[in-house]
């Protein structure tokens, strides 16, 4: 049989085909190696870096809505301790009541409720709702641990003269809660349902334990990854006992802090406008971040005046082994919220914010939250 020799054209064609095949294989391998991680993969790496078991994030812009739940959690959404994010919901309730005329922000609260627990009643008679929302009540954060048996009857003392300095106080919010409940003749969770949870579509949000939480509430973990269990609070407290999820709370953020829904325009403006001097977290001590003159407080909400983004509305939550943070940029109609069921949840503020805002420059609110002075004042 005569042996057929391939034509020069055929040889060239085969050589080109082999080269193309090799290039495609190498490109496929290289592309796999160089593939950019997804946002979800980046969030997982962020959570893993500080041993956060469960991280929930929601980011909304006018063009997009992104939701992530990193780790093994209940579906559709786990429910977290909102910690001090509880205060912002309550602040809205108080402002709504002010618009309705049922509370006067500048009327002393003793005219609405008793001041029996206060050791200095002359100072107590000066406290108004506005001072509480601006954290200028002069009160310490707590008279005693608010989940303890003794807290409801513990003596309330002053750390500073009333309306003299910004001093963050959960005790002030609890005092205002008692006034609101006395005015309305109802417990705070029922009031919150009518003013916030129902109108803003927040079915999994509550200041009290509800049946859904038996399946959806997250356990929390300390920095050593020790499971601290699912905490149940002994009583509803507007300063820290709200439970919620990223979707529920985002509904509140966007409809209230971006759209201004439910409030008179003048009231909304007061809500988000810096009031008074720079807010210092550990008065009278001054940290480096306090000298930047960028962090202020409105009526129950943090405000950062930022060179890049303009005004940023924000609040952080810290119940020890449960952390939370939201920020809203009204001018850009952007909102970001995350919940972490770990004591290390605030270690990754900068990483999470940079991932979504696309700016690696840390916001001052991050340092304000995490930087402690060398020695805390008594």
Image: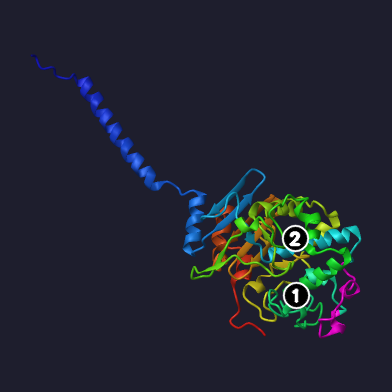
Question: Which residue is painted at 23% across and 28% down in the image?
Answer: 15
From the viewer's perspective, tell me whether residue 111 is left or right of residue 47.
right
Quadrant position of residue 269: bottom right
Region of the chain picked out in magenta, as a range: 105-124
Secondary structure under badge 2?
helix
- Label at residue 234: none
Reply yes or no: does residue 287 show up in magenta: no
- Label at residue 89: 2
Residue 37 higher or lower than 161, as above or below: above
The C terminus sits in image quarter = bottom right
Residue 165 higher or lower than 36, as above or below: below
The picture places residue 256, in percent across and down from the top left corner, at 76, 53
* Residue at the top extreme, as displayed: 1
Instruction: Tally the marks.
Output: 2
Query: How packed is label 1: few (under 14 Cα within 10 Å), some, or many (20 or more)?
Result: many
The picture places residue 7, in percent across and down from the top left corner, at 18, 18
Quadrant position of residue 86: bottom right
From the viewer's perspective, tell me whether residue 291 is left or right of residue 36.
right
Query: Counting residues from the N terminus, which is met first, the one under dot 2 or under dot 1?
Result: 2
Question: Which residue is painted at 17% across and 20% down in the image?
Answer: 6
Q: CA distance from mark 2 to mark 1?
A: 16 Å
Query: How packed is label 2: few (under 14 Cα within 10 Å), some, or many (20 or more)?
Result: many
Secondary structure under badge 1?
helix
The N terminus sits in image quarter = top left
Tell me which secondary structure the magenta stretch mostly adopts: loop
Reply yes or no: does residue 112 show up in magenta: yes
Q: Nearer the viewer, residue 182 or 356?
A: 182
The picture places residue 29, in percent across and down from the top left corner, at 34, 42
Q: Is residue 302 visible?
A: no
């Amino acid at each position: 049989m005569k042996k057929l020799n391939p034509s020069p054209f055929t040889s060239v064609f085969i050589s080109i085909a082999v080269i193309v095949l090799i290039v495609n294989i190498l490109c496929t391998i290289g592309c796999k190696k160089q593939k950019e991680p997804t946002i979800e993969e980046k969030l997982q790496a962020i959570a893993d870096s500080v041993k956060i078991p469960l991280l929930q994030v929601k980011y909304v812009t006018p063009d997009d809505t992104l939701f992530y739940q990193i780790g093994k959690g209940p579906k559709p959404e786990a429910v977290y301790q909102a910690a001090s994010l509880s205060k912002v919901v309550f602040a809205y309730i108080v402002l709504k009541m002010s618009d309705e005329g049922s509370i006067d922000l500048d009327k002393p609260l003793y005219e609405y409720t008793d001041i029996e627990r206060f050791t200095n009643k002359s100072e107590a008679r000066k406290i108004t709702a506005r001072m509480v929302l601006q954290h200028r009540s002069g009160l310490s954060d707590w008279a005693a641990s608010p989940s303890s048996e003794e807290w409801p009857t513990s003596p309330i003392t002053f750390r500073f003269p009333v309306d003299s300095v910004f001093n963050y106080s959960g005790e002030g919010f609890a005092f205002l809660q008692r006034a609101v409940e006395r005015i309305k003749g109802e417990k705070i969770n029922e009031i919150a349902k009518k003013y916030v949870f129902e109108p803003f579509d927040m079915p999994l949000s509550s200041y009290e334990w509800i049946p859904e939480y038996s399946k959806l509430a997250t356990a929390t973990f300390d920095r050593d990854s020790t499971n601290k269990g699912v905490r149940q609070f002994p009583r509803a407290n507007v300063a820290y006992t709200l439970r919620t999820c990223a979707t529920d709370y985002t509904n509140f953020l966007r409809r209230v802090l971006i759209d201004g829904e439910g409030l008179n325009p003048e009231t909304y403006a007061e809500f988000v406008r810096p009031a008074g001097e720079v807010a210092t977290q550990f008065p009278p001590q001054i940290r480096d971040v306090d000298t930047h003159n960028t962090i202020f407080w409105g009526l129950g909400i943090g405000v950062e005046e930022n060179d890049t983004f303009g005004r940023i509305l924000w609040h952080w939550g810290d119940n020890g082994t449960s952390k939370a943070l939201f920020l809203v940029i009204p001018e850009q109609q952007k909102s970001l919220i995350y919940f972490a069921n770990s004591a290390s949840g605030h270690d990754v503020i900068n990483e999470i914010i940079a991932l979504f805002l696309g700016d690696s420059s840390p916001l001052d609110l991050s340092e304000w939250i995490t930087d402690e002075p060398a020695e805390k004042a008594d």
